[in-house]
Amino acid sequence: MADALAGAAGALEKIQQQIMWNRLIAVVEEQAQVMIRTAFSTTVREAGDLSAGVFDLKGRMMAQAVTGTPGHVNSMAESVGHFLKKFPAAMMQPGDHYITNDPWLGTGHLHDLTVVTPAFHRGRIVGLFANTAHVIDVGGLGMGPEGRSVFEEGMYIPIVRCFEKAVANETFFDFIRAGTRLPVELEGDIYSLCACNDAAAKRLAEMMAEFRMESLEPLAESIFAASRAATLEQVAKIPPGTYRAEIFSDGYEAPVRLAAAMTIHDGGIHVDFAGTSGLSGRGINVPPAYCRAYASFGIKVAVAPEIPNNWASLAPFTMEIPEGSILNAPRPFPVAVRHVVGQLLPDLMMGCLAQAIPDRVAAEGSSCLWNPPLRGGGAVSGAAAELADFEVITFNSGGTGARPTQDGLDGTAFPSGVRTMPVEATENFAPVVFWKKELRPDSGGAGRTRGGFGQIMEIGAAGEAEFAVNAVFDRVGNPPRGRFGGGDGAAGAVALKSGARLRTKGFQIIPKGDRLVLLLPGGGGMGSARERDAAQVERDVRSGLVSAEAARTLYGWSDRDAP
């Protein structure tokens, strides 16, 4: 009888912990949604380029919002510890908010603001909420690869209090307003980041009161123990050994090689990036936390995708990043567009895992966001400017790689997970016109399952005025590769409508009367194209996404099958 009662009590406790876990997820998701609803930056409001999470008093991430990017979430998971080193939890007060955009203490470049806020229950600090958001402008050269040090790339904010006991630090906000081209938007975004943490702290206090919790520690330890054990269980299913792969970026001065040796062992997965190219003199370098963030994500989505993302489920994945590598940039190397290289890392991880678990990886995709920062007005044209000054960035994506049993996704951001921004939102914010935004035929790599299609975009300024693009594009010289016999996706291209090709990276003028044309890459295919279902080929031809010529050449499609 006693054993039965003890068993029932244990089962009830597990059920209660699961309910509390679900509530915690709801709290951080509300945190993210409050940020989206109150944000000034279109990158947050429209694209969801953000992260939100709750941490214990040791700085360990307990839960993250579903909304958000791996680069933000997984590097933010490291950043809270840096905040606690400067401002220990014992000295934090209700209403305090702490902020930084330090690329080496935050999430990799100056355009990301990270805010940490203590949460209190019954007068005692019980946890921390953190968030990160990409803002449009922090001064300097703007978001682009042209800087030769981080000091040229924008305003550098160390870890400081922006609010103390709910009172704004006006000296801090004076500096913020003076250091950006968009003072209203930047100040508004900081208030938004603080407000969403406040909302989450309030919900957490309500949850703890409801469940009569005095501390988050028992729940945290339960979450961590279950997550780590479940992750290691999945790792144990992979054949042990060392698997190697490489991938190439177009780079800036020269192509960049990313190399990895992944070792599967009893205690987890270790990745050694020896053989990776050295540092660049321009802003494509990657701080190590951002490297770990996307490499861990690339492993996790293939090995343990169903296990919640937190400190314990990430702990079994360890990285060795050689000094002097482009993936281990030291301060003050330029890092403004670290995503161009960093977002290739999941494809690199899947290149290793394809040798061990081929049925759980995708082909390479466009990977790196195609998010052109656009600028116009006097800052570009001087006294001859026909437009008021503007600075805007719009997020867009090529195709993802094919999956073992399904085609790749069209115009979808992987691995970042951000949403494609509606052209109407960008046109409403800045004097630009999107003349064309459509899927790019024949861009998906052929295969038994084909790659997702890229896009064709044509962008001009209002009145066909002169404007500029700070190009941050990749996958032009090194298109996404197929797997297991699948074809490569189409390479990207950057040009003027008048025909001249543009550089894939760097600040360039779009002359008056001309337009910027972007051809976004398609994803790689998987498996032999001759094994593709004929009905699927016909569907693609009928829709205009695959030309009849490509269908005949690549898939063996016959003219008699033409619609």
Image: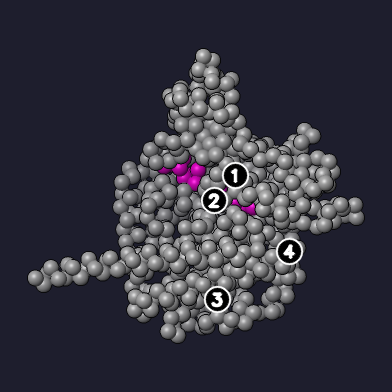
Tell me where residue 104 sits by quadrant: bottom right
Q: Which residue is mark 4?
A: 182
Dot 1 amino acid type: Ser
The amino acid sitting under disc 3 is: Lys
Q: What residue is disc 3 on?
A: 86
Answer with left or right where residue 481 lies relative to residue 389.
left
Q: Residue at x 50, y 43 (%)?
A: 347
What residue is at 68 percent from the left and 69 percent from the top?
187
CB under 8 Å between discs 2 and 1: yes
Q: Compute the Cα span from label 2 to label 3.
A: 30 Å
Q: Is residue 346 magenta?
A: yes
Residue 527 x/y as whole percent: 44, 29
Task: Name the residue that disc number 1 marks.
Answer: 397
Counting residues from the start of the chain, the first of labels 4 and 3 encountered is 3
**What residue is disc 2 on?**
416
Q: Tell me the kind of residue under disc 4.
A: Leu
